[in-house]
Amino acid sequence: MRCGERSSTRSERRMIGEVIAVGDELTSGERLDTNSQWLAVRLTDLGLRVMRHVTIADDLSSNIAAFRAAAERSDVTVVTGGLGPTADDLTREAMAEAFGRPLQRDSEVLDGIRALFRRRGREMPERNAVQADFPEGAIVVPNPHGSAPGFALSVPRHERLDALLICLPGVPAEMREMWFGTAADLIANRLGPQRRRIVHRTLHCFGAGESDVERRLPDLIRRGREPSVGITASQATITLRITATGADEASCREAIEPVERTIRESLGHLVFGVDGQRLEQVVIASLQERDETIAVFDATTAGRILESLGDADPQGTTFVGGTVVTIAPVPDLRLADAAARYPTRSSAERCRESFGASWGLALQRVVDDDSYEAVPTDDAGVRSEREPIEYLEITLTDGRHPHTRRFRFAAHPDILLPRAAKQGLDLIRLTLAES
């Protein structure tokens, strides 16, 4: 077995979770389903492996089919939506028909709904009485601040543990309160001794692409290994998520530690933070440790780098200011003196002096007229023309030693400027680490 890897047995099988969201407004795209993402995180924290997110319209036959399929393939399913009083709220009826559990009215719950309306100075419409109907054998999940109680239903399965289906309203505030008040405990009790603890550790990287990062790792992202390592990319930041499953948190942390060590040894300075840390937060923390400040001249990112540093230092004690300008790329003067050849050096120094900062950073685009690349000019790629290569030049200076780097200024439009801002931040991080 490889570093940090454990064998697993059938008895250690993680129980399977599923999330179902009900509503025409979701399937039509009119409204974004945020409940499923929120619930998936909580189910995972309880030790379940969430295998499916299902979204279905307000259609009775589709609801029935979805609930039956979920009960067959998943140990725990959480359903949101469809518990209102209107004709298109079908979750109660669909659950009853799916599992042969006739709806029964709970008089105590009905009295509670009437009392809720009275407290709000209204008389309960008779249609709301259906919200006190539950499939036979269901456990009521109280809704402290709404008229739509939820319910939990246990569904027998052949030679397997009963499936547990929990139905909650689609209103996020009510759903979350009911989760913490009742639903989470119901699931934890159902899992019992089979419950496994799940712990995550995320490492954030910058300076290489997703495939390059994966290439540098020694078989860590292989499917089926434990702990598992997943890789994602967002706005040029690569995140590695280590996930361990065990009897308790301590055993999970013990399994994660050698995997994290291997990743750090393999990637070196590419790793800049852990567990949600942003690059600008790491930069500000490093400057604060040194009791130093920084100012920025931004002629490239349209203020993104200044905004990032300002968010990380809201008091403005470390990031003391900056300037945003819009100028065309300047030519690369190869044979000129250093001041002319590296335009960001003078900009960084002027910015540092202007704001009285310990460090000055400047970002500007530079065109290399002596280097060209072929650029297709039609969809077929038959004709092409030569264009000079454009670079992002960045200089960081403390007034004595300028640190200048150049990067190709080319990427998908959605990440071009955010990546440029991070390249500036990363130059600060790496320079501070070396000095």
Image: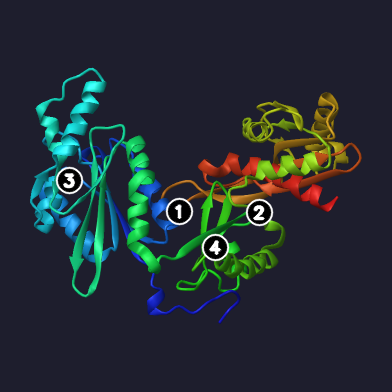
Is 147 on the left or on the right of 251, as rendered? left
- Image spot of residue 287 (x, y percent): 78, 40
Alpha carbon distance from label 4 to label 3: 37 Å
Which residue type does callout 1 highlight? Val
- Image spot of residue 278 (x, y percent): 62, 45
User: What colouring does the structure picture have?
Assistant: rainbow
Which residue type does callout 3 highlight? Thr
Disc 3 is placed on an element classified as helix
Label 4 vs label 1, nearer the camera:
4
Residue tagged by mark 1?
382
Q: Earlier in the sequence, mark 4 or mark 1?
A: 4
Disc 2 is placed on an element classified as loop
Q: Report the residue at 41% width, 49% height from top.
A: 379
Tag 4 near tag 3, CB within 8 Å: no
Report crowding for label 3: few under 14, some 14 to 19, many 20 or more residues within 10 A (C-alpha): many
Report crowding for label 4: few under 14, some 14 to 19, many 20 or more residues within 10 A (C-alpha): some
Residue tagged by mark 2?
207
Residue tagged by mark 3?
91
Which residue type does callout 4 highlight? Glu
Alpha carbon distance from label 2 to label 1: 34 Å
Decide which of 341, 74 is in the foreground and name it. 74
Decide which of 342, 257 is in the foreground and name it. 257
Disc 4 is placed on an element classified as helix
Which residue type does callout 2 highlight? Gly
Image mark for residue 249: 4
- Image spot of residue 354 (x, y percent): 83, 24
Q: Residue furthest front?
A: 108
Alpha carbon distance from label 1 to label 3: 57 Å
